[in-house]
Amino acid sequence: MAAPILVFVLLSLASSLAFAFDPSPLQDFCVADNASPVFVNGEVCKDPKLVQAGDFFFSGLDIPSNTTNQLGSNINLVNVAKIPGLNTLGISMVRIDYALNGLIPPHTHPRATEILVVIEGTLYVGFITSNPENRLISKVLNKGDVFVFPIGLIHFEFNVGQTNAIAIAGLSSQNPGLIPIANSVFGSTPPISDDVLTKAFQLGNNVVDSLKSKFSPAN
């Protein structure tokens, strides 16, 4: 990875932290205590005297993810579950690998803005503004390019290049969440009534049932 791109990644993550939506820390750190039975908005703090360097460390973001799936893409999310020291710091990051024609389908992050930098390859990316405008804002990105997906808006990434692609993204939450649109609507548990989906999407029952079969958790 070239030095200028590393600088971009670091600046992107710093920017993400500056506009974090998670609770602000009131001490140097609040390392997550994953063994605590207490449920709070975030994670319970570990005793600072027990904190080690490993609580702020993760290794393996250099390793490509397996993209031999229907979408031809995969992610490696580094959030508070992997780095307990992220708790209350309002930031996480992800490596995304794309095979040829690989797609990260339309989805949202309910708790985070995302800033993405292309490390290798060419991506067609975009997001959709809120109703009633519903305007697509999109761009083709090449190596070193940066793009922002505002919090909560539906967005996507598609590899339109001639090689595999890699991107790194910073997100303004320790746990940004992920809502894939098709999976959520047609693959919910329990399933949404066909009456709701046929009317909402103006589709026949046979089409709705077909989509449910494609996106059900069993698949």
Image (cartoon, rainbow, N blue to C red):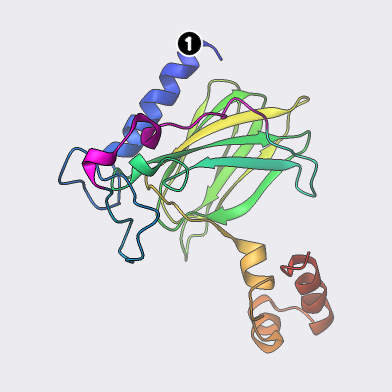
Q: Locate residue 56, reporting x and y percent.
A: 37, 34
Q: How crowded is mark 1: few (under 14 residues within 10 Å), some or many (20 or more)?
A: few
Q: Mark 1 points at which residue?
A: 3
For the stretch drawn in magenta, what is the main secondary structure? loop
Q: Locate residue 145, reporting x and y percent.
A: 52, 25
What's under tag 1, amino acid-wise? Ala
Taking depth in this image into account, of 110 and 41 the one nearest to the observer is 41
Quarter location, residue 10: top left
Taking depth in this image into account, of 37 and 99 the one nearest to the observer is 37
Q: In the rendered image of this protein, does residue 107 appear above or below residue 54? A: below
Magenta range is 47-64
Q: In the rendered image of this protein, does residue 122 appear above or below residue 184? A: above
Q: Please report the residue visible at 76 percent of the width from the left and 68 percent of the height from the top.
A: 218
Image quarter hosting the N terminus:
top right
Image quarter hosting the C terminus:
bottom right
Q: Locate residue 30, reporting x and y percent.
A: 26, 45
